[in-house]
Amino acid sequence: MKITTPVAIERWTQALRVLRELTPHERREHFDMKYWGKKTECGTAACLGGWCALDPWFRRRGLIGKWVGDEEKAVLDFPKKTPTEFFNDCLEGPYIFGECAVSYAGIVKMVKAHIAKLKKHPRE
């Protein structure tokens, strides 16, 4: 199901908020685009989609991540929609929810560019 441009802009803007709310330590040590989310010895590591799935704003809208497996080595699973499905409803969003070697700063740049593109070329 495709969604409207305003809803897509809202989702990507909220994703940018989630990124900005990560602490400097989380950005360096716990932002990892190779995993939806996993428990590590020093806390949670996740990609943009995983961090969004743990955020209340996204959870209220159906992007819900659940921890499965041993508590110490749990991984994030998605009983309803994966981040790829949730964001690809957003009118051909950038493909950033797979194993990619993009840094925190690179993901922020991609999300900002996509928001600007949606604002410049809205589609209904």
Image (cartoon, rainbow, N blue to C red):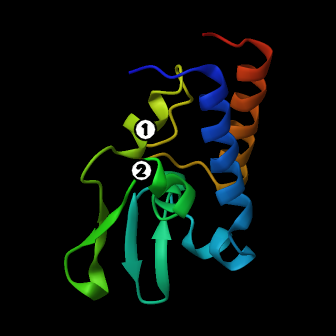
Identify the residue shown where x is 27% and y is 86%: 71
Quadrant of the drawing holding the C terminus: top right
Q: CA distance from mark 2 to mark 1?
A: 7 Å
**Residue 17 spot, x, y in % from top left:** 71, 55
Is 100 left or right of 21, judged from the image as shown? left
Q: Which residue is mark 2?
A: 63
| Residue 86: mark in rendering | 1
Crowd around label 2: few <14 · some 14–19 · many ≥20 (10 Å): many
Give the mark nearer the N terminus: 2 vs 1. 2
**Residue 89 spot, x, y in % from top left:** 45, 27
Identify the residue shown where x is 28% and y is 81%: 73
Residue 65 appears in which quarter of the rendering? bottom left
Identify the residue shown where x is 30% and y is 87%: 72
Residue 114 appears in which quarter of the rendering? top right
Closer-to-camera residue (53/48) = 53
**Residue 35 spot, x, y in % from top left:** 40, 59
Callout 2 touching callout 1 (CB < 8 Å): yes
Q: Is residue 66 above or below residue 91?
A: below
- The extreme front residue here reads 60
* Amino acid under disc 2: Leu
